[in-house]
Image: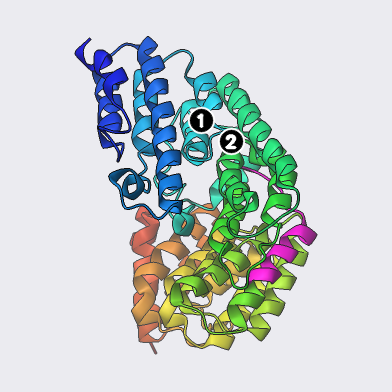
Amino acid sequence: MYLKNSVPHLTVENDPRGELRAHVALAISRVGDPEDINDIEVLMAADVQRIQLGLAARARREHTPLAEGSAMRYTNQYVQAIRHLKSESEGPFLAKLLPEPIFELEVAWALVAWAMTTDLPNTARIDSSATWTRNLEEIWQARSADGIKGFDESRRAEAVGYVRKHIVELLQSDGGVANEGSVIWRLKDLVRPLAILDGRNSSTLILDILASPLQTNGTLDGWKVLPTLEVLLFAGAILPNDKTYALVARYVEQLTSKWQSDNDLSLVGIALGVLPFVEDASAGIATLADYLDHIRMRSEGLRKVVKALGHSRREEAVDLLLSIVHADESIQRFGQEWLDAIAVLDNVRSREILLSVIDPTLPGIQGLNISKLDVVLAPRIAEAAQRHPAMKSRILALCDASLDHPRRELLSEVIVHLKDDKALLTSPQPAG
């Protein structure tokens, strides 16, 4: 009761930075009841007033505590308090807060968390790492799933309605003005939570917003746009070639036409890594190959492209992977990622490439140092052989062949990884 009674006494005058209100909100959420969400609403409304009055004071060049405290934001703490109370009205309550620009992005993410039955990935909101820890096979799982996994469906549908409605209202209010301080900038932030909630069904709206240009030079919004394309893929969306090409071309051209920081250059890998998963993936891979013929990428970007090709499930990916390793002549720098990509493709040609490192009758991989990559090679070859009996038979037959020392050593490691008693009894013959 003491905490609740303090709410009306927290004024702009005695809390010009808003810190006390935020602490009281968190405290109420820890000891209060769900209906105390109304007190959180009062505190948030007062904080909005504090910020507005403070900004007006700064515009008048005042140097008061209120003016100086106007930069302080406690949105995250307020949203935490709302979520902790677990009120039955949490969804509609959050929706009421969306129109307030100070709260809108935190609230949109809170609606995602409210609708989810699992924890939101820690990296989902980080522009540079939105999908950093995710397995690309999740793209195919999302595409083949009957519904959208990881959500309470009724809450998800409700949250989608709230966020979409807010986005559409913002679009209608903008009047077409697009600069870095405009509604377009806010919209490019808001479409990522929508992509997680409803990437399949809302992809057209999201792509149109991502394509909206800023009236500035450079790649200021690249970290908002390109990771969101990846989020759409993980949500099961099928990206149309033309719209995706246009976005990729915009940022690749900006990033490769003049000097950029290493951080910004890593966007090139994100942009090109989307292409193997577009609607017409064969055409996407061909477009990717054309880019790689004309631009030079850092190893980090190539690793991302190589990984994407490996999970593309396309025959054409093998040719491009071979082209990458032949052109770059530095397989030792990202050899593990390259070999993983070949193994994941798991088609006839990719299995022949894996076999070539132990079978001298097959064309080898240019620049591959077996001794430095045997830790990766042996398990990948064995895993493929376990799935394909014909490949396993060829490997066992090599035990009777005359092999040089590196191949013989690697073959022995493969036999061990096969975990087959009969195979273990078969000893590779020494070199003749």
Question: Main SS type for the magenta part?
Answer: helix
Q: Amino acid at mark 2?
A: Leu
Identify the residue at horizontal 49%, vertical 29% (top origin): 116
Is residue 402 toward the left or the right of residue 207 in the image? left
- Numbered circle sitting on residue 211: none
Crowding near the residue tagged with mark 1, few <14, some 14–19, many ≥20 C-alpha atoms within 10 Å: many
From the viewer's side, name the closer residue of 423 and 228.
Answer: 228
Identify the residue at horizontal 37%, vertical 49% (top origin): 71
As displayed, is residue 300 above or below residue 18?
below
| Residue 273 found in image quarter | bottom right
* Image x and y of residue 129, in percent: 45, 56
**Mark 2 touching mark 1, by CB under 8 A?**
yes
- Numbered circle sitting on residue 197: 2
- Farthest residue toward the left? 2
Q: Secondary structure at mark 1?
A: helix
From the viewer's side, name the closer residue of 209 and 315.
Answer: 209
- Per the rendered image, the range of residues in magenta is 235-251
Nearest to N terminus: mark 2 or mark 1: 1
Which residue is the site of mark 1? 111
From the viewer's side, name the closer residue of 276 and 344.
Answer: 276
